[in-house]
Image (cartoon, rainbow, N blue to C red):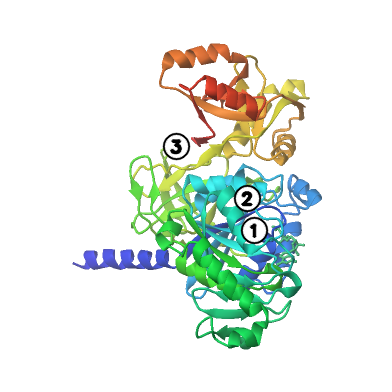
Amino acid sequence: MERISEVSAERGRIAEEVRRRRTFGIISHPDAGKTTLTEKLLLFGGAIQMAGAVKARKAERHATSDWMAIERERGISVTSSVMKFHYGDYEINLLDTPGHQDFSEDTYRVLTAVDSAVMVIDSVKGVEPQTLKLMEVCRMRNTPIITFINKLDREGMEPLDLLAEIEDKLQIECAPLTWPIGMGKRFKGTYSLYRKELNLFRSGQDRLPADLVTLRDLDDPLLEAHLGLQADQLREDLALLQGAADPFDEAQFLRGNQTPLFFGSAINNFGVREMLDAFVEIAPAPRPRETTTRMVDPGEEAFSGFVFKIQANMDLAHRDRLAFLRVCSGRFTRGMKVIHHRLGKEISLTNPIIFMAQDRTGVDEAWPGDIIGIHNHGTIKIGDTFTEKEPLRFTGIPSFAPEHFRRVRLLSPLKAKQLQKGLLQLSEEGAVQLFRPLGDNSYILGAVGVLQFDVAVARLRTEYGVEADYEAVNYAVARWIEGEDRRKLAEFESYYGNSLALDRNENLVYLAPSDWELKYVMKKWPEIVFKSSCEHL
Ligand code: GDP
């Protein structure tokens, strides 16, 4: 009997920890205000004392490592990190995604480890290209998305036009939960549609309790008292909205079909708390995850997790690589013995790290939704699954079709072996993708962001002692090729031999010189399946 009660106590504890957890990422185009928003969120979580700390950290961190110098030089963040903070009763894991043009495949892959995302949109610029790309990745797993429309203190697009643009370009229904009153110099604040409350704006100042005004209804004279002539505008907007926008529907949100919308100004810390309060309430706790054999529920007692990112040489002196593992079920404890299924070996997770907002610290326990860092000497790859006993493999950790290509040129001719080894390891880690053209012996590297190329040559030099650089190649798109019809596939192969390559797992990839060419070829060969992502094996 005792055993049974112990078992259910453990189950109860896990369920409770799962309920309290929210693991999310912020997606945005550069300059929309992701860093500023992150900072305010961390401030609410009490994780940082000072505004400016996130920016400062952006510039300072990993000052010792070599290829991180690239990051410093360009003043951008190459790698994404994890920030953990508490808010009320909630434990929040915020996974950072680099927002610069030179972002990498990591940016995409981080989104495979989150349960929801916050999308930041600049009210002046509307939907921008990088938001579109990141949104596509969220769509692969129907990740629920909460939208924060930022910079209302500036003259931006009309809110209704913004909604229309989001619905049109991102193909997601919008359900505003707050509504802005004016913008720019006339920005008076927001009206909360679910609390029937005015939130009055004061630029750059601390909020006062008097800034929140509860209204009886929209005819309440308090509206005039606070908004003057803009009161009528708000009434009109809300009447229009009734016809134009959908009411919030939690089920639709959780399926990724609808996004609740908040308006504010991150730099003025306005509208952020409202969003955070709603976020913890409606964003999903860790959800069941699919493996090749079954769904794994986070409430299961046995521990399981998968690696979604590997970061090399955070500390050059130790040459360590850190594998980022997302806990999917059960309780993780320091020193735990787990099975590394790809290798079929038992290993001890002796020195795990948990990421707090400011630094890394040791971790004794972690729960589903948490991210832990494991030291790794080259035996862990992206997509690896760790469990206590049952052999499982989590799916949905893909490689994404690269958009930039280079041919590697070896400058130290006696190092061909080291070059091959280095490129293989870098590609296993997910730092770059490696292709071998069918027609020759060269190495083609593919990347989602061009900075990945600079990182690759820098690491070949420091870690493998190989001098290499690149030459241009005339490829712009890659697609993994499959086909049921073997005869057609063979025909395709012989026809396009010069544009075909094998990836590091010997999967066939078609490399096209342009989007136009790809479309043309796809139309001509309807029997062939062209895939823009491929499971990371
Ligand atoms: P990121 O590139 O998305 O991380 O964007 P940042 O957070 O670094 O912000 C980009 C620029 O927009 C910075 O100069 C910020 O000060 C500014 N910014 C952020 N939020 C606001 C806002 O609410 N209003 C205004 N006017 N500027 C903002």
Residue 269 placement (x, y as % from top left) = 67, 73
Residue 351 appears at what percent x and percent y? 53, 55
The residue positioned 62% from the left and 53% from the top of the image is: 97
Examine the rendering and report whether any part of residue 351 can be seen: no
Residue type at tag 2: Thr
Q: Which residue is mark 1?
A: 121
- Name the amino acid, label 1: Ile
| Tag 1–tag 2 contact (CB < 8 Å) | yes
- Disc 3 marks which amino acid? Leu
Q: Residues within 10 Å of mark 3 (few under 14, many from 20)?
A: few
Q: Are marks 1 and 3 in contact (CB under 8 Å)?
A: no
Distance between the alpha carbons at the discs numbered 3 and 2: 37 Å
Horizontal placement of 128 versus 175: left or right?
Answer: right
Tag 3 or tag 1, which sits nearer the N-term? 1
Mark 1 closeness class: few <14, some 14–19, many ≥20 residues within 10 Å: many
**CB atoms of marks 3 and 2 within 8 Å:** no
In front of the other: 412 or 108:
108
Q: Report whether 24 appears left or right of 3.
A: right
Question: Considering the numbered disc 3 on the image, is that residue within a helix, a strand or a loop?
Answer: loop
Query: Of discs 1 and 3, which sits in the foreground?
Result: 1
Q: Element under label 2?
A: helix
Residue 361 numbered tag: none
Numbered badge on residue 343: 3
Residue 117 position (above or below residue 417): below
Q: For mark 2, what is the residue?
A: 131
